[in-house]
């Protein structure tokens, strides 16, 4: 199909292209603890995540749409909704009617990207990359659990791949994007191509728990210490506001300097970013009580490396496989990165040495709450929110998404049969409001980008922008 050709993107047209139109009776599968908790964390942020890909040309929209639908055909969870049970019943992933699958693909012709702003790559851009307004959230209770948005632009298309954290973490979203473009590639070579059916695969943490004895799990429960909220990002007020995205891009030279600093201090890029994030948080608060007192942030570890071995098909199934852990540091006013990096590396090295066990306490904590049914889950979240509202404190979160590698998503051929290149890739994280606050880091072609998605009004845009500048200033 030639670029610029008018497309009809209805479900009827898809069926007429030869896709399966058979009706399958709705079926379901229990939602595991990590899915359930990542849905109900919606009380402090919107759990929708997006990866935005900027290409240097136009994709074949019909191929992208077909690839999206065939991913839904291959994975029953993708074509499901998060269905809450009656009364005390536990939630399930429940298949939605095939007629509702069409929500998984959205097409915006040139200048109609749905954000209220034109997007482009030229010097006259109205909205730079990444966008300053997040895409619409995904309704986990309505489904499907994937949305692919093609925004047609004069200089090249943008493709936004969207999921909900209740369905998968950022690593799972990256897996979906990789599978989406691989399916496009296969369809261009063989129009009848269909990904292998995944069936109702196990999304729980059973593969992790199976590696530990009862005694080891009891010890992990005894060692687990509750997170203590000790500070929060400066807020103008509580409540909701207007979703916004703030970002800061660091040149390849900054990455080179960071690596040199890390080599000198035995620190990874992740360690360095945690240190800069902590110092910037202390600086933006400008609160004398923070000086010399323990202050904490949350960060995450992806267990895929420990759970799945090489060649394990389960490693590619999109799901929640990340656990949170706390990093507590102490420093005085006027501190620099050298003053805290040793504390950071001590914590992260200890966690890495624990291997798969680093997440055991977190996993058992969620599993034990779920064992009490929905009343126990609701009680937990009510108590969590009550604590935030009483103390006005909520530790910030830093998440390192990792490196986006071009070869994970290419090669692709555009609608004009020309090979496409990626101009840029960026993850847009969950949108937070007080007292939640999250900053994520992703890297593409040695360019590091830090991003905050927040609600303006409760948070001041100028304060968020100044915070990102402070993070930059504390880096080497």
Image (tube, grey):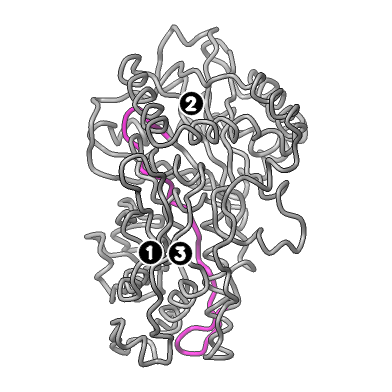
Q: Residue at x 28, y 82 (%)?
A: 10
How far is mark 1 from mark 2, CA to CA?
Answer: 39 Å
Q: Which residue is mark 3?
A: 78
Disc 3 is placed on an element classified as: loop
Q: Position of residue 166 (x, y in %)?
A: 44, 48
Q: Please give the range of residues in magenta.
A: 412-437
Disc 2 is placed on an element classified as: helix
435, 153: nearer the viewer: 435
Q: Along the horizontal axis of the image, is 377 left or right of 221?
A: left
Q: Position of residue 342 (x, y in %)?
A: 70, 22
Q: Earlier in the sequence, mark 1 or mark 3?
A: 3
How far is mark 3 from mark 2, CA to CA?
Answer: 39 Å
Residue 463 in view in this figure:
yes
Where residue 381 sits, quadrant-wise, is top left
Circle 3 residues within 10 Å: few <14, some 14–19, many ≥20 = many
Disc 1 is placed on an element classified as: loop
Q: Earlier in the sequence, mark 3 or mark 2?
A: 3
Q: Earlier in the sequence, mark 1 or mark 2?
A: 1
Q: Are marks 1 and 3 in contact (CB under 8 Å)?
A: yes
237, 55: nearer the viewer: 237
Compared with residue 120, is residue 330 higher up or lower down, i.e. above or below?
above
Q: Where does the C terminus fall, quadrant-wise?
A: top right
How far is mark 1 from mark 3, CA to CA?
Answer: 6 Å
Kindly identify which numbered label has been placed on residue 144: 1
Kindly identify which numbered label has been placed on residue 343: none
Q: Which residue is mark 2?
A: 280
217, 247: nearer the viewer: 217
């Amino acid at each position: 199909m030639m670029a610029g050709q008018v497309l009809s993107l209805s479900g009827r047209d898809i069926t007429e292209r030869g896709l399966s139109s058979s009706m399958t009776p709705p079926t379901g599968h229990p939602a595991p603890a990590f899915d359930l908790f990542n849905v109900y964390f919606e009380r402090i942020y919107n759990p929708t995540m997006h990866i935005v890909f900027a290409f240097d040309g136009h994709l074949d929209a019909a191929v992208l749409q077909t690839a999206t639908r065939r991913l839904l055909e291959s994975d029953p969870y993708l074509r499901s909704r998060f269905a809450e049970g009656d009364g005390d019943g536990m939630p399930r992933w429940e298949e939605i009617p095939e007629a509702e699958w069409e929500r998984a693909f959205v097409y915006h012709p040139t200048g109609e990207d749905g954000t209220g702003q034109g997007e482009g790559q030229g010097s006259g851009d109205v909205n730079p990359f990444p966008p300053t307004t997040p895409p619409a959230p995904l309704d986990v209770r309505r489904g499907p659990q994937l949305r692919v948005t093609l925004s047609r632009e004069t200089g090249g298309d943008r493709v936004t791949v969207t999921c909900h954290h209740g369905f998968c973490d950022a690593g799972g979203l990256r897996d979906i994007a990789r599978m989406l473009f691989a399916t496009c590639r296969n369809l261009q070579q063989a129009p009848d191509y269909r990904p292998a059916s995944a069936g109702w695969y196990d999304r729980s943490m059973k593969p992790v728990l199976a590696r530990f004895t009862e005694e080891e799990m009891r010890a992990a429960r005894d060692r687990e210490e509750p997170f203590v909220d000790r500070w929060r990002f400066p807020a103008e007020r509580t409540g909701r506001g207007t979703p916004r995205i703030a970002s800061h891009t660091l040149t390849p030279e900054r990455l080179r300097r960071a690596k040199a600093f890390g080599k000198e201090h035995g620190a990874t890029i992740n360690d360095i970013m945690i240190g800069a994030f902590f110092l910037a948080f202390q600086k933006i608060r400008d609160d004398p009580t923070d000086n010399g007192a323990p202050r904490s942030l949350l960060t995450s570890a992806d267990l895929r490396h420990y759970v799945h071995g090489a060649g394990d098909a389960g490693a590619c199934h999109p799901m929640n496989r990340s656990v949170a852990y706390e990093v507590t540091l102490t420093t005085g006013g006027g501190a620099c990165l050298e003053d805290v990096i040793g504390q950071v590396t001590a914590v992260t090295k200890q966690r890495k040495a624990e291997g798969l066990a680093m997440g055991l306490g977190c996993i058992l904590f969620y599993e034990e709450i779920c064992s009490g049914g929905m009343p126990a889950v609701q009680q937990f979240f009510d108590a969590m929110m009550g604590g935030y509202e009483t103390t006005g404190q909520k530790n910030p979160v830093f998440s390192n998404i990792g490196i986006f590698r071009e070869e994970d998503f290419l090669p692709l051929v555009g609608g004009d049969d020309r090979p496409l290149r990626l101009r840029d890739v960026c993850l847009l994280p969950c949108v937070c409001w007080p007292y939640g606050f999250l900053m994520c880091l992703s890297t593409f072609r040695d360019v590091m980008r830090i991003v905050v998605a927040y609600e303006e009004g409760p948070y001041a845009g100028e304060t968020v922008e100044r915070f990102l500048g402070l993070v930059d200033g504390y880096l080497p």
